[in-house]
Image (cartoon, rainbow, N blue to C red):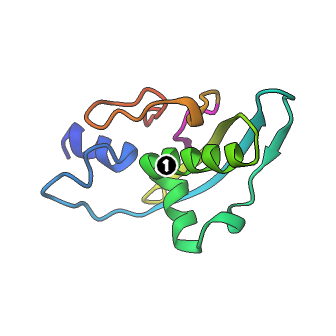
Amino acid sequence: MTLFRMMCSWTEEGHRLSWRMMLRSKSSYTSYNVVNKTTGEKTPINLDYYLTRKQIRLASTKPDVIWQFSQHLKKDYKKKGQDIQVFVNANVSVNGKPYQQLIDPKVDLANTEWKVFKHNDWILPSK
């Protein structure tokens, strides 16, 4: 397996743009936490409140969807008059291998840009 194909399985970067789709299984346990920039109050997000089961699966294993949902949370809280940060703790297993951290939990995804054609540094490498 080439390095590019292995990387696509983990980071999903370029996966949907590739001509060859790899069959693989991903599972995860993921949590989203919103932090109010003014008060410092930390609020865990109940994904069932925002997303369907299928969307939760996507927002737990695919970095671009994780980022998009973080942007959605930012807009939702802005409507409520709150300026927030979003931190994600995503642990992912590919094809039954041990769980590993996918997203850097110290990065505020609500205030991070998505690089479409480059690697996003907040997506951690597979060990």
Please give the name of the residue rendered at 49% of the width and 48% of the height, measured from the top-left corner. Answer: 68
Can residue 98 be seen at all in this image of the molecule?
A: no
Specify the quadrant of the image occupied by residue 74. Answer: top right
Question: Taking 46 as reference, is 12 left or right?
Answer: left
Is 110 drawn above or below residue 95 in the view shown? above
The furthest residue to the bottom? 53
Name the amino acid, label 1: Gln
Residue 52, horizontal then vertical, whole percent: 59, 73
Please give the name of the residue rendered at 69% of the width and 48% of the height, measured from the top-left corner. Answer: 79
Residue 123, horizontal then vertical, whole percent: 46, 34
Can residue 115 be seen at all in this image of the molecule?
A: yes
Residue 106, horizontal then vertical, whole percent: 64, 27
Question: Taking 34 as reference, is 38 left or right?
Answer: right
Quadrant housing the C terminus? top left
Q: Residues within 10 Å of mark 1 (few under 14, many from 20)?
A: some
The furthest residue to the left? 19
Does 46 appear in magenta? no
Pick the front one: 101 or 59: 59
| Residue range of the region highlighted in magenta in the rendering | 100-105
Magenta residues: mostly which secondary structure?
loop
Please give the name of the residue rendered at 33% of the width and 30% of the height, measured from the top-left corner. Answer: 119
Secondary structure under badge 1?
helix
Specify the quadrant of the image occupied by residue 81. Answer: top right
Q: Which residue is mark 1?
A: 68
Pick the front one: 23 or 83: 83
Residue 103, horizontal then vertical, whole percent: 54, 38
Is 121 drawn above or below residue 57 in the view shown? above
Does 104 appear in magenta? yes
Please give the name of the residue rendered at 58% of the width and 73% of the height, measured from the top-left corner. Answer: 53
Is 64 drawn above or below residue 121 in the view shown? below
